[in-house]
Image (cartoon, grey):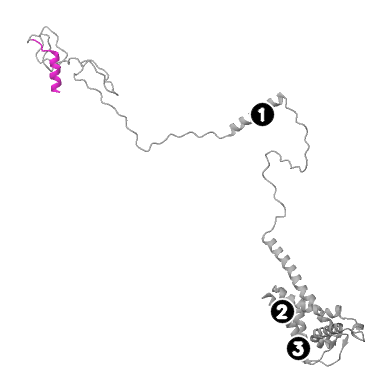
Amino acid sequence: MRRDYFTCVFLGLIAGALMFVCFAPLYFVYGGTVPRDFSLFERMMSLLYAVFFIIFLPFFAAFRTKVWVNWGLAAYGILIYLPRFFYPAEALITGDDAKLTKMLLAVLLRGIYGMMQAPFAALSPLIGDKAASGLVYWILPTALFWPLVLKIIRFYRRAYLSEQLNPMPKVKPAVTTAHTGPAVKPEVLGTVITAPVVAASPDEVAGKAALSQSASEKENEIEAPEKEETPAIPLSAPASEEKEAPAIPLSALASDEKEAKPIQLGAPAPEEKKAPEVITLSAPSPDEEPSKVIELGAPLSETSGDGPKPDPDKNVENDNDNL
């Protein structure tokens, strides 16, 4: 599509120039002019042709970045310079020694010159013959000038807008944090020659060790204390302490004696069986002191005023059966 722009512009300029050649005789010929009169219509068309192809089209194509249009204008503008640089000498096209190739080249270059000058011939009464014949040479410069100028303008405009959107600070901010570490030595390029290494003395070694030890102690002091471990909180309810009921002896203790009741955590140790104290149901003898114990069972083997006492082992068995 871009190549079509180039072709259309180049051929359009040639077609427009041929329109002036077909309907009116040439005014500018190579090496001179042929005087004639110009109509008003021809003058208007010449003015429109010059304004459109020399002023408007090169600027509009460069503004819309249609570069191929400008290339087509530049290719057409080059044609007018061919007769100036490649027209053969008069000696080569006249006389008996004239060459056919040179004559054909001369005819072609005269035709190009007359075709390209024809659209501007009607402007000669307004601006003069010299100025009118020189307008065609402005097609090539304007086709190259406007794209270059507009490209430079766009470049500086984009740079200005980018600077306005992202302004750079005029003064660099001062560094607030000081460098506490060791100084960084610049890297040396090339061969580095160092002095011979001398072994350190015992005093130097001891001093370095003391400095390193003091530095490590300071670091240990600076370090934060370790966190104390908190006791684990049980999820379940705490187990209630198991308390065993105090062992109640089968026989009642004397009222005047008080003994502590031990709490047995394990199995009770086997104890010797003792004969429980029995409560005598009979009245005590008058000469004896009243008994402090109450006998619940039969009297023991010891005799009293009522009769013989039963065997204590039998009484324990009977008491166990009763319980």
Q: Choose top left, top right, bottom left or bottom right for residue 44.
A: bottom right
Q: Which residues are magenta?
A: 308-323
Tell me if 215 is positioned left or right of 289 in this view: right
Is residue 261 rendered magenta in the image? no
How far from the left and from the top, in percent, is residue 272?
Answer: 22, 15
**Viewer-side label of 2, 1:** 2
Q: Position of residue 106 (x, y in %)?
A: 85, 83
Choose between 51 and 288: the one closer to the eye: 51
Q: Which mark is residue 19?
A: 3
Q: Earlier in the sequence, mark 3 or mark 1?
A: 3
Hey, what amino acid is under mark 3? Met
Amino acid of disc 1: Leu
The one nearer the camera, 94 or 205, is: 94
**Which corner quadrant of the image does residue 256 belong to?**
top left
How packed is label 2: few (under 14 Cα within 10 Å), some, or many (20 or more)?
some
Q: Is residue 187 above or below residue 113?
A: above
Label 3 element class: helix
SS type, badge 1: helix
Q: Is 55 placed above or below 184 here?
A: below
Mark 2 to mark 1 CA distance (whole Å): 87 Å
Question: What residue did someone put label 2 on?
Answer: 7
Q: Which residue is mark 1?
A: 211
**First reached walking from the N terminus: tag 3 or tag 2:** 2
The type of residue carrying mark 2 is Thr
What is the quadrant of residue 43 in the picture?
A: bottom right
